[in-house]
Image (cartoon, rainbow, N blue to C red):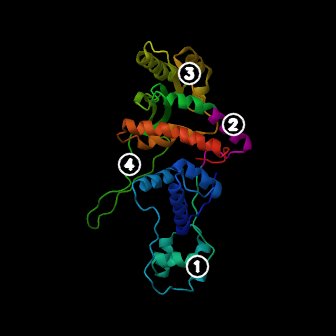
Amino acid sequence: MQEYIQLHRIDWTRYRSVADFLFHQGKNAKEVFIVMQETYPNRAPELDTIQRWRRKFDEREIIVCYVLSPVRMPIVGLGPEIKRIIDQDPYISLQRIAYLLGLDKLIIQNAITRETQFHKVHTRWIPHQLDDTNRIKRVNGAKFMLPTLRKCKANDYRYLQTSDESYVFYCYRHSSQWIEGQQEAKQEPRKREHDPKVMLTVFWSAHGFRIQYWTPKGQTMDAKTFTQDVLRPLDKQMRNIVGKERVSVYIHYDNASIHRAEHTQQFVHNSIFTLLFHPPYSPDIAPSDYYLFSRLKTQISQAELYRAIDSWIDRLEILIATAGKDEL
């Protein structure tokens, strides 16, 4: 699926100005995000961006500025030549056009903006094209989850475990290198589907990692392996943590086939866990999908883990407030 969105400098200046005004009105980042989604549908900044602006605002930093470029005589009349080049190759880079015309990239960019109708677009991958029925299911699912998450927040998410899986390649090739003088850079092939790799399954909470399971070489993750080697040790671990306390222990994962398998569901039914519902078509509101594996190689603090799950509630509230129209 593809969406084509081109944001210009004036757009970002406008968004920052609106956010700055709303911050001065006492609104938090989530409230500003909802207002901007309603005002600028499909073009408003992401929640993470607005949260970053809010942190700068709280630190009394300036979030709105516009730097004027030095005054110089514009070069005009390049439109027809640029159009001829782009018509021949719609995928040509700005740097290549500048090289062909013997001019600076900024001059070419300004000429394209002033004298042609062309603009550069990027594709944005989305996991599923949602229709009205899908959105209703997402909203209803979010409403179902929110009370449980708020209940879990009362005890700092201690008894809420969420999970995800990701393939980890044996070797991550470097994308850059140092060379001396006129040495030629080495060529590195892209990773392929059949390159050596293993699947990492992780269960974690706001208080740290609970289970990290590496699928043995030559094996695949199925429902029996998932229950025997992942859920069963996690169940034992959580029983030891809970002890004689009378609390509910929640477990969350997405709607993958091994998670929906009868073998898995039967085990969960007989375990200490209460399965937390996950709305269909909603990988964008799973904490691991938007947070954990992007930082697999880094050291993650408890405060960051807590904040990641805490943001889960914000995302669900936004999903409900926008009637499922916002794809986070």
Mark 3 crowdedness (10 Å alpha carbons): few <14, some 14-19, many ≥20: some
Q: In this rendering, would 241 be left or right of 257?
A: left
Q: Where is residue 37 in the image (x, y as percent from the top left)?
A: 62, 53
Which residue type does callout 4 highlight? Arg
Q: Is residue 177 above or below residue 70?
A: above
Mark 4 crowdedness (10 Å alpha carbons): few <14, some 14-19, many ≥20: few
| Circle 3: element type | strand
Which residue type does callout 3 highlight? Thr
Q: In this rendering, would 223 be left or right of 53?
A: right
Mark before the other along the chain sequence, 3 or 4: 4
Q: In terms of depth relative to the viewer, which is nearer, 81 or 305?
A: 305
Q: Please say if the residues under marks 2 and 4 sit with CB atoms less than 8 Å apart.
A: no
The circle drawn on residue 137 is 2
Q: In terms of depth relative to the viewer, which is nearer, 76 or 53?
A: 53
Mark before the other along the chain sequence, 1 or 4: 1
Taking the spot 29% from the left edge, 59% from the top edge, the residue there is 178
Q: Where is residue 116 in the image (x, y as percent from the top left)?
A: 61, 77
The answer for how far apart the CA atoms under marks 3 and 4 are is: 41 Å
Which-is-in-front pick, marks 2 and 4?
A: 2
Q: In this view, does 254 lie above or below 18?
A: above
Q: Mark 4 points at which residue?
A: 173
Is residue 74 visible to us here?
A: yes
Name the residue at the front extreme: 25
